[in-house]
Structure formats: structure tokens, C-alpha cells
Image (cartoon, coloured by chain):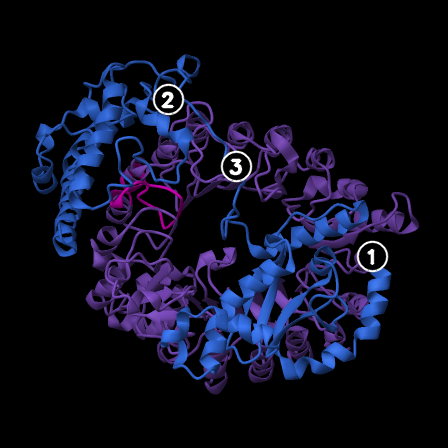
């Protein structure tokens, strides 16, 4: 390869797109490092505090797309207080000052401001794609800037963000001459939408492929929108509250029949139960169905819809579908690859909508299943062992038994054996979440068998430090480990400090680690940022002189970094 | 043992465990043929080779681990004697003989306890009766005592000891179940809308942001976790104590006055701060005009304002407040 001119090598590298692969080729030799550096188009930064914008720009001067993730995963469940960090502003400012021709920005769990969005919209002439997932801190005013200034915008994809809806006119800020929209997702906006502006925008967007509406878009507007966008591939229905045979309903049915390219359906944030029948004509082509917000639709209607969806690959649904419904899925959806079953009743009020039987049925009926997220009230080892035998291809296996410490409901044993079978059978398992009653044993299995495991979520499990040690010692590819309410302490934390350099991050909350232990770790490992998130009476511990031995009632989050301590931490975050 | 010694001994445990694993991987890929094959429902899913591999790997990993019978607990932690360990005792996945399993359960338990009672002063947690995490309730206590092997078919289990006491009032654990707050709030809104029609109260959590004048960052509270204004007020006091104290002239959060929790209350009662909320129409109102149930239905955001800033608030919306309360009555 060294005899080829650089342009040829670069051309070959163009075919290498995955981040891991590109990282690998950059390590081969100095010349490849240099070529790869200048030709890298897409940069992925899994932890925004692991590196600085300046260093990013020094290494990759020519990238077009940046993906940044901010807060740790458990922030999704309110375990990280407001103001912790993850601010995108310094990144946008640094990129704006540089000569990078940014075209795409994808952010997850970051704090975005209207000022930042305004700066973004003005700084990059060719900016095409903005994807914000679980972000917060901005309002529809920021969206108005994006709409007004980004002439070549293709994608505006807002997934599950907390956006201050000023009920303004951001949709009408798209210029009349603007026709390049491909993706528009504003399902997470809570306020009213300017329907006229929306309809005009959709009507002048011939390339529109994905449209996800918020709950303020009523049925008649939906009918009109679909009539002007029959080419749509991915639809998120906002609101469907109407009488069964109203004129709008009929118009919608007529429009739907023309949407022969429709492959993905979601939304139904406000839905009359009978509404799904309007979509039956397009079901046979659907590959993705997300009804996990449609709390008002009864299980029987869901089942009637799914019976027509023979090509379904991805299904997100509520547990109101029941075990019977999952059996229908198992017998109908032979192409199913990913299933998520969410709980309707979050307080475990004894509603046993789905049980281990539903999971077993799915595993038996869907040979291509590789990703599952399953919330349920009860589980057994026997069921998990059967699932493992039926489906050895799991890449992601996340089981959440709603009641912490719940054992096998038939044998009252811990669920160690069941999860053990899963990790032993699924040799490609990359992500695992465990729940129910679990002892150190399950971690022994995980350490022994889950050789490809990259992310592990543990809650209310284990007995002693050995549990955590099994995982740290055994899972060589571990990148993210997050633990809550489990009895792992300083001994496990400090056993192998170098391990954390091979991982992206470690989270431990309500465990047995002490402040002294964390401080020892921070001293031994200067390449780590060891943060304690402290929400309670912080200073009692230090004052009373118990700092060494008193349990950290708060949260430990540590991550590797090449840029040292961050400067934007709020006072309740102690960086050791 | 002092923390340092304890740390070192455990560090050596960890590293020796790692060494063992390394050693194991080099030698033990061949399946063992000497495992007894008692039929069991649990094992049906595993291939014979895998069973064998498990058995060998498992036994030799038992460094100071459950199942070992060596009496001297301390030496066990430091010496690696795989040869001493009885492979049949250890691995529940193994098709081991029935009579061994119950004792293996007990040995696991006792082995665990002795070792860790010696090295870590955690007696309360790791007692004879309850070798699991203490919060694991009565229902699980019987696991050790029962003479039950993993591989006994369902029907034959003795369930006499199985005192499953369901937790009385399920306290809401923060961040559990692990469902994104966006999803929780969205479902709550959907349920609330439909329940308003039915007249039933909503059941999901209701998170609203709480800001305070002068505080550097916001907090969030779940309104449904309180049942009246008093509880909300107490919770907010606790949350925002540090800020007002900072403003009282102590040096940030390290002042000795931290423990004086009555200060905020005094401040609130002394009308230095008032609690206000933003309702569905975007108006800022004083908290307290409506009944608690109505309040949580309309409150979108909370704000702790300085008394002087809120004076206008008290007076102006009064007529509107009356109107609104008429509408809602």
C-alpha cells in the first residue's frame, strides 16, 4: 500500500466508514494516520468531556459530521441533577471560529441553547442536518433560527427533547423558496402548531421522506398533509381524535391508500382506539411500528393491526398488548429483529399484562430477533433458559423486572441461572441489562461468557465486591458500566485502576463506595475524571471527619479523558 | 483489618483471579467427559460440550469463592489452590448429584460469610440468615434454607418456607423503573387528558422544573409524590437551603450554618421568598389559591421568587384568579 499515491489510499479509505475501523487504520503507520486524519468525514465523540473542541479540530480539520454525547445514560431516569453539564455551546463556538464546513450535528443528552442554535445556523453555509436526542435548554426560538438561516437544511429531527414551546411561528420561518426538506420530526413539542405554515411547507417539499407530528396536529390536518406527501416513508401521527366515519377520517383513509412507500409508523400521542384500522391498507409494507406512546389504544386493536404486518422488523409497543398479543406477533412477524415492550403501569400496581410467557413466545417465533427491551412483572429461570436456546443471536438483551430483587416467581431462586444461560448462548451480546433477584453468581457468568459485552446495566443486584470484580476482570470489551443500588464498594472500585482507561465510563450510585475510596482512585489515575454528584447535605461528611469511611450517599461518575478536569462543573459536582 | 490491608488483600485476590482466568483460558477448551449427567430441566438448553467446559472453568475459578471447603479462610484468599476445590460442589449449572446440591447451597452461603466477615466489617449484611442484599425481603430469605437444587423440576419444590410478603406500600424509588422521563411525562399527559374526561386522577409522575431567583441551576420535582402544599414546601426548602444560606453571607456551602434547616423556612415565612407557579395559560400565579388537586393539574413550572418581586403578582391576577377558580369550580 505504501507504493500508492496518497489519493489512492484515501480513496480506499472512503469505503471504510465505521468509526472503529477508521480508528484502527489510523494506527497502522504515520502515513496512514495522516491520510486518515484529513479524510475523516464523520467524527463520533461518545463523551463530550473526554476531549476538547480544540483538540478535535487539530486532529480532524476536515470533518463534516459531528456526533456528541453528554450526560451519562442514567440521566434519562432523573439520576443526574439539572445543571450537571453537557453543554454544547463551547463546541459550536469553537467550530464556528474554525474553517470546518460542518454539515451535520447529532447530539444526545446535551444542553443546547437558543443562542447556540442561532450561532450554528449562521456559521455553516452548507449545514444540512440537525438531530437532537434527549436534549434540553432551548426553545422554539432556536428552531426558528435554524429554519430561517439554514438554506440547505435537509433534516430537523427532534427526538424526545425538552423544548420550551413558545407557541411561536417557527414553522413559518422556513423561507418560501426553501424546498429541500427530507426529515421533519417535531413530535416532542407540546404546544400548538401553525397548521397552515406546516401544510405549505410539506406541499413544497417533494423530497420529504420522514414526517413526525406533535399532538397538536389534528386528524383533518393529517389527512391534508398526507394528501400532499404520498411519497412519505416514515410517518408519526400526532393526534387522531375523531369520530369513526367522519369526513376527515374518510379523507385520511383515501390519502393513506396512496402512500405506497410508507414503511414506518409511529406517534398516536392522542388516539381514539378505532383509528388504527385506517392504516390497515399499508400494514403489509411496514417494517417499523412504534405504538409505545399510544396508551389509549386497547390491546385488541393493536393485535388487529399487527396481524397484517408480516414484514415488521422493528416493534415498539406497550405491555397492554399482553402475552396473547405477543403470541400474535410471534406467529405473524417472522422478520422481527428488534422488540421493545414498555410498561403502561409504572408503579407496579399488579397489572400482569406481559409475563415470561410472552418473551418465550417471541423467542420461539422470531428467529431473526437480535435486540430486546422487555419490561415485565415476573420472570423465571426456565423461561430465560428457553429464550437463550431459541435465540442465540441477541446483540442487545435488556430485561427489566419492575420490582427490585424479585426472584424466579415459581422457584423463588435468584435469576442467576437464567441470565447465565443468556450470556452463555449469545456469543455476540454487546449490551445487557439485568434485573430481579441476583447474586454474585450472575456476575461470574457474565465475566466468564460475555466476552463481547460493551455495556452493562446493573440495579439492585449482587452480594459482595466479587460480583463487580468478576465483571471488571472478565469482560475485556466493556466500555460502559453503570451500577445502582448494589453492594459494591471500594475494594472492587480500586482493584484494577487501569481497567478504566479501557472503558468510556463507570457510574455507581447508592453503592458501597466511600469518599475516601474515590479519592484514592482519583490519585492513582490522573487520566480519569472522578466526579461525585452531591445533592444532599454535602458538607456534613467532611466536617464530621468521617470522610474516609462514610459511604458516599451520592453518585460516582468517572470517565477517561485527555483534557483533564472540566471547568464547567456546577458546585454540587465534586471533581476529585 | 484496616482499610489499607483490606484493600491490598482484595487487590491480590483480584489479580490472582485474573491470573487464574488467564491460565484457564490457555488450558481448558476441551470439554470434560466426566460430568455426571443427571437429567434436569435447567440443563436442556446447554450443549454437552458447554456443560463440560463450564464445569472445569467454574471449579478452577473458585478462588476464595463459594463452594470451597478449605477451613482456613485467610489463606484461601491468598493462595490459589484449584486442586483443592471440589468441582462438584460449586457450579449449580452442572448436572451434579442431587444430594450435593443442597449442601453446596449451604457451603456457598457459609463460605461467603466467613470470608467476608473476616475481611470486611460487614457483619450486618452478611449474616447466617440473609446472605443477600439486605433489602431483599423476607421472601428471599428462605432461599438458603430450602433444600432445593436448581435442577429439581418445578412440581417438587417445597414451598413451605416461602414466605413471600409483598412490600406493603411501594415506596417510589428514584429513577425506577428505568423509563425515560420524557416517556413518563408523555404517558402521564395522555392519561391525564383521558382521565380528566373520566374524572379519575392521573397516576404517572408529574415532573415540573423549579427555579429560584439567584440560584445557579434548576431542580425538578414530581408533584404527584406529594399530597399537599405542606409536603411540597418542605421538600423545596430542603432542596434550596444551600442557596439562601449562601446569600445570607456564609461562604458558599461550606459554612457551619449548613445544618440550620430552619433558616429557609424562616425566610419563607418572613415573606422574603414566595412560591409561584406558571399555569397552562402561561400566567404566573401565587401558589396556594387552589386546592392541591386542581393545582397539580394546572401547574407547569414553579418559581421561588423574592417577596418584593412577587408583590405585583399577588395583586394583579387576583380578579383573574377568581375567574379561574370560578371556571374550575
Judged left or right of residue A306, residue B317 is right
Q: Quadrant of the C terminus of chain A?
A: bottom left
Q: Which badge, 3 or 2, comes first in the chain's sequence? A: 2
What is the C-alpha distance between the residues marked 3 and 1? 54 Å
To which chain does the residue with label 2 belong?
Answer: B
| Residue pointed to by mark 1 | A227
Which callout, 3 or 2, points to the residue nearer the camera?
3
Vertical relation: A90 (above or below) A158:
below
Q: Residue at x 38, y 27 (%)?
A: A413
- Residue A459: x and y in percent read 41, 46
**Residue A224 lies in what quarter of the image?**
bottom right
Residue extent of the magenta highlight:
A445-467
Tell me, yes or no, whether dots 2 and 1 are on the same chain. Answer: no
* Relative horizontal placement of residue A470, taking residue B298 as reference (left or right): left
Seen in the picture, residue A33 relative to B84 is either above or below; the reply is below
In this figure, which residue is indicated by the disc labeled 3? B168
Q: Is residue A452 magenta?
A: yes
Tag nearer the camera, 3 or 1: 3
Q: CA distance from mark 2 to mark 1?
A: 56 Å
Where, by quadrant of the figure, is residue B255 drawn?
bottom left
What chain letter is assigned to the residue under label 1? A
Name the tint of chain A in the rendering: purple
Task: Residue B126 in the image: state x and y as whole percent.
Answer: 26, 38
Amino acid at each position: 500500500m505504501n507504493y500508492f499515491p496518497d489519493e489512492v489510499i484515501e480513496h480506499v479509505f472512503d469505503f471504510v466508514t465505521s468509526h472503529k475501523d477508521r480508528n484502527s487504520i489510523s494506527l497502522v503507520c504515520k502515513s496512514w494516520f495522516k491520510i486518515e486524519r484529513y479524510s475523516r468525514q464523520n467524527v463520533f465523540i461518545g463523551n463530550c468531556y473526554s476531549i476538547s473542541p480544540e483538540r478535535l479540530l487539530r486532529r480532524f480539520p476536515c470533518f463534516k459530521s459531528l456526533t456528541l454525547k453528554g450526560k451519562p445514560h442514567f440521566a434519562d431516569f432523573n439520576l443526574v441533577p439539572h445543571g450537571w453539564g453537557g453543554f454544547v455551546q463551547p463546541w459550536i463556538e469553537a467550530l464556528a471560529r474554525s474553517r470546518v464546513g460542518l454539515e451535520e450535528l447529532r447530539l444526545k443528552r446535551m444542553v443546547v441553547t437558543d443562542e447556540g442554535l442561532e450561532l450554528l445556523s449562521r456559521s455553516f453555509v452548507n449545514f444540512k442536518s440537525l438531530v437532537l436526542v434527549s436534549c434540553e435548554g432551548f426553545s422554539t426560538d432556536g428552531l426558528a433560527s435554524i429554519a430561517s438561516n439554514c438554506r440547505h437544511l435537509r433534516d430537523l429531527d427532534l427526538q424526545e427533547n425538552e423544548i420550551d414551546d413558545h407557541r411561536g411561528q417557527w414553522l413559518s420561518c422556513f423561507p418560501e423558496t426553501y424546498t429541500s426538506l427530507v426529515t421533519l420530526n417535531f413530535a416532542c413539542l407540546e404546544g400548538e402548531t401553525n397548521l397552515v405554515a406546516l401544510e405549505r411547507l410539506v406541499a413544497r417539499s417533494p423530497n420529504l421522506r420522514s414526517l413526525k407530528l406533535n399532538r397538536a396536529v389534528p386528524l383533518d390536518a393529517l389527512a391534508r398533509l398526507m394528501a400532499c406527501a404520498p411519497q412519505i416513508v416514515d410517518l408519526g401521527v400526532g393526534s387522531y381524535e375523531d369520530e369513526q366515519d367522519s369526513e376527515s377520517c374518510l379523507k385520511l383513509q383515501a390519502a393513506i391508500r396512496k402512500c405506497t412507500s410508507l414503511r414506518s409508523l409511529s406517534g398516536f400521542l392522542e388516539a381514539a382506539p378505532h383509528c388504527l384500522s385506517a392504516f390497515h391498507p399499508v400494514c403489509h409494507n411496514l417494517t417499523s411500528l412504534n405504538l409505545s406512546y399510544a396508551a389509549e389504544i386497547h390491546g385488541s386493536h393493536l393485535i388487529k393491526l399487527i396481524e397484517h404486518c408480516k414484514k415488521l422488523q422493528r416493534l415498539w409497543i406497550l405491555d397492554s398488548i399482553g402475552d396473547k398479543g405477543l403470541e400474535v406477533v410471534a406467529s405473524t412477524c417472522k422478520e422481527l429483529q428488534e422488540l421493545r415492550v414498555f410498561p403502561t403501569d409504572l408503579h407496579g400496581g399488579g397489572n400482569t399484562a406481559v409475563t415470561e410467557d410472552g418473551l418465550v413466545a417471541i423467542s420461539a417465533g422470531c428467529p431473526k430477533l437480535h435486540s430486546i427491551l422487555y419490561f415485565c412483572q415476573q420472570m423465571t429461570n426456565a423461561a430465560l433458559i428457553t429464550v437463550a436456546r431459541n435465540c442465540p443471536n441477541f446483540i442487545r438483551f435488556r430485561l427489566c423486572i419492575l420490582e427490585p430483587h424479585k426472584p424466579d416467581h415459581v422457584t423463588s431462586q435468584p435469576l442467576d441461572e437464567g441470565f447465565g444461560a443468556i450470556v452463555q448462548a449469545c456469543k455476540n451480546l454487546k449490551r445487557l441489562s439485568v434485573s430481579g433477584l441476583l447474586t454474585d453468581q450472575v456476575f461470574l457468568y457474565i465475566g466468564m461468557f460475555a466476552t463481547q459485552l460493551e455495556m452493562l446495566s446493573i440495579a439492585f443486584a449482587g452480594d459482595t465486591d466479587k460480583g463487580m470484580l468478576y465483571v471488571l476482570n472478565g469482560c475485556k470489551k466493556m466500555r460502559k458500566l453503570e451500577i445502582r443500588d448494589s453492594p459494591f464498594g471500594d475494594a472492587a472500585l480500586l482493584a484494577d485502576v487501569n481497567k478504566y482507561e479501557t472503558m468510556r465510563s463507570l457510574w455507581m450510585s447508592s453503592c458501597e463506595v466511600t469518599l475516601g475510596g474515590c479519592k484514592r482512585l482519583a490519585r492513582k489515575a490522573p487520566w480519569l475524571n472522578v466526579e461525585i454528584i452531591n445533592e444532599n447535605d454535602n458538607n456534613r461528611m467532611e466536617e464530621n471527619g468521617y470522610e474516609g469511611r462514610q459511604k458516599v450517599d451520592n453518585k460516582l461518575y468517572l470517565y477517561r479523558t485527555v483534557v483533564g478536569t472540566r471547568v464547567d462543573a456546577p458546585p454540587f459536582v465534586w471533581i476529585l | 483489618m484496616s482499610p489499607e490491608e483490606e484493600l491490598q488483600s482484595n487487590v491480590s485476590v483480584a489479580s490472582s483471579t485474573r491470573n487464574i482466568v488467564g491460565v484457564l483460558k490457555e488450558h481448558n477448551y476441551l470439554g470434560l467427559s466426566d460430568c455426571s449427567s443427571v437429567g434436569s430441566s435447567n440443563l436442556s438448553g446447554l450443549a454437552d460440550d458447554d456443560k463440560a467446559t463450564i464445569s472445569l472453568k467454574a471449579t478452577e475459578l473458585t478462588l476464595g469463592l463459594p463452594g470451597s471447603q478449605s477451613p482456613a479462610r485467610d489463606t484461601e484468599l491468598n493462595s490459589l489452590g484449584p486442586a483443592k476445590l471440589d468441582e462438584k460442589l460449586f457450579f449449580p449449572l452442572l448436572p451434579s448429584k442431587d444430594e450435593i446440591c443442597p449442601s453446596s447451597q449451604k457451603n456457598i452461603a457459609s463460605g461467603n460469610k466467613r470470608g467476608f466477615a473476616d475481611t470486611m466489617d460487614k457483619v450486618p449484611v452478611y449474616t447466617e440468615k440473609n446472605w443477600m442484599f439486605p433489602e431483599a425481603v423476607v421472601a428471599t430469605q428462605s432461599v438458603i434454607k430450602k433444600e432445593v437444587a436448581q435442577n429439581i423440576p418445578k412440581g417438587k419444590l417445597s414451598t413451605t418456607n416461602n414466605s413471600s410478603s409483598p412490600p406493603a406500600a411501594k415506596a417510589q424509588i428514584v429513577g425506577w423503573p428505568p423509563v425515560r422521563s420524557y416517556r413518563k411525562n408523555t404517558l402521564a399527559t395522555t392519561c391525564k387528558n383521558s382521565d380528566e374526561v373520566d374524572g379519575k386522577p392521573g397516576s404517572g409522575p408529574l415532573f415540573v422544573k423549579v427555579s429560584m431567583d439567584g440560584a445557579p441551576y434548576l431542580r425538578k420535582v414530581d408533584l404527584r409524590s406529594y399530597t399537599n402544599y405542606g409536603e411540597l414546601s418542605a421538600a423545596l426548602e430542603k432542596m434550596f437551603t444551600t442557596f439562601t444560606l449562601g446569600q445570607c453571607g456564609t461562604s458558599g456551602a461550606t459554612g457551619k450554618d449548613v445544618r440550620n434547616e430552619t433558616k429557609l423556612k424562616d425566610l419563607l415565612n418572613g415573606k422574603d421568598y414566595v412560591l409561584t407557579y406558571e399555569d397552562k395559560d402561561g400566567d404566573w400565579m401565587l401558589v396556594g389559591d387552589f386546592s392541591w388537586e386542581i393545582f397539580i393539574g394546572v401547574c407547569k413550572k414553579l418559581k421561588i421568587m423574592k417577596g418584593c418581586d412577587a408583590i405585583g403578582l399577588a395583586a394583579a391576577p387576583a380578579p383573574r384568579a377568581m375567574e379561574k377558580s370560578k371556571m374550575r369550580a
